[in-house]
Amino acid sequence: MAGSKALPTFCFLLCAASCALAAASYDYMILSLIWPGTSCQPGWFWKPSCCVDPLIDNPERDFLVETMETYDSVTGKLVAKCEPSCRFLMNPLAGLTDDLNAYWPSLSCPAQNGKQKWKDAWCTYGNCTSLSEVNYFGRALQLRARADVLHALGSKAIIPSETKSYSLEDINDALVPRIGFSFTVVCTRNYIIWPLIYDDYLTQIRVCVSSDGRSIITCPNGRESNCGDTVKFPTVSYPLHGREDNAVSSTVIKLTSGDEMAL
């Protein structure tokens, strides 16, 4: 009798473990790179729409990491929050802090350092991977540098401007030689006269990467761009520090070759 009562309990635990494993299953990731020129466009009454921590240098005027999400290619769905509890430590990231501040900052208002943003990324997506903290964040930074989106666009004369617009086709054509068919261009639509007259602003480039975070890959699940035929690509202004200038591509991060090999 004791054995027969234990069997349903065992089956229940086995099922629960299997379901938990299935829920945590992912086989590729998407690196979301945001354009701060759009994120920091002034809001209503010129209220700043982004802020940076006054205690650190301004982030780079380049495409910045927003997050690196985990996905299941079979379902095409996001895989997130795979653990009921999450432990996030800054100590393992000590060697990456300067690069995280430069290329993975918090732009939310009121101004704050990036620790909460990094914790959210780790606890939502990083915990679903087999990567350590330093590998999750370090490889995301390396992939951002390898994609070098700003340089790829600039090589085709697509440069930040307050007056020019660029065709979505030209943007795609500029990126394919650099990162292949691994990306989706995402825009934010600003209506001038709803619903007929509007501008689309380049907001994100979403890049598909391998499950170990080492390689840029062709996206398993195709995603259409939400941009119209023409796209604005505004210059970057970080309003809290009152500095404004055109973006300049930064092609490498400050990791030494030894650090890179360790990731």
Image: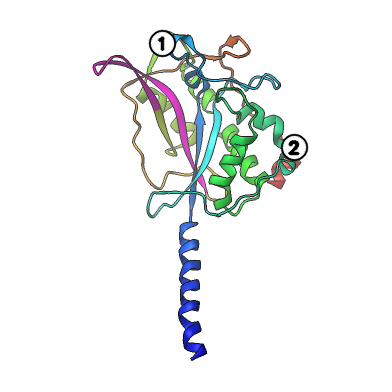
Q: Is residue 10 above or below residue 135?
A: below
Residue 85 highlighted magenta (yes or no): no
Mark 1: few/some/many CA within 10 Å (<14, 14-19, 20+): few
Mark 2 residue type: Gly
Residue 78 at x, y percent in the picture: 44, 47
Magenta residues (range): 187-210
Marks 2 and 1, how far apart at CA = 39 Å
Residue 212 at x, y percent in the picture: 57, 50
Residue 164 at x, y percent in the picture: 41, 10
Disc nearest the viewer among 2 and 1: 2
Q: Is residue 27 above or below residue 150?
A: below
Q: Which quadrant would residue 137 be assigned to in this image?
A: top right
Which residue bears the numbered disc 1? 164
Give the residue furthest to the left: 196
Residue occupying the point 49% across, 62% down: 20
Mark 1 residue type: Lys
Mark 2: few/some/many CA within 10 Å (<14, 14-19, 20+): some
Residue occupying the point 56% across, 16% down: 247
Q: Nearer the viewer, residue 71 or 117?
A: 117
Residue 200 highlighted magenta (yes or no): yes
Residue 137 in view here: yes
Badge 2 marks a residue whose secondary structure is: helix
Which residue bears the numbered disc 2? 95
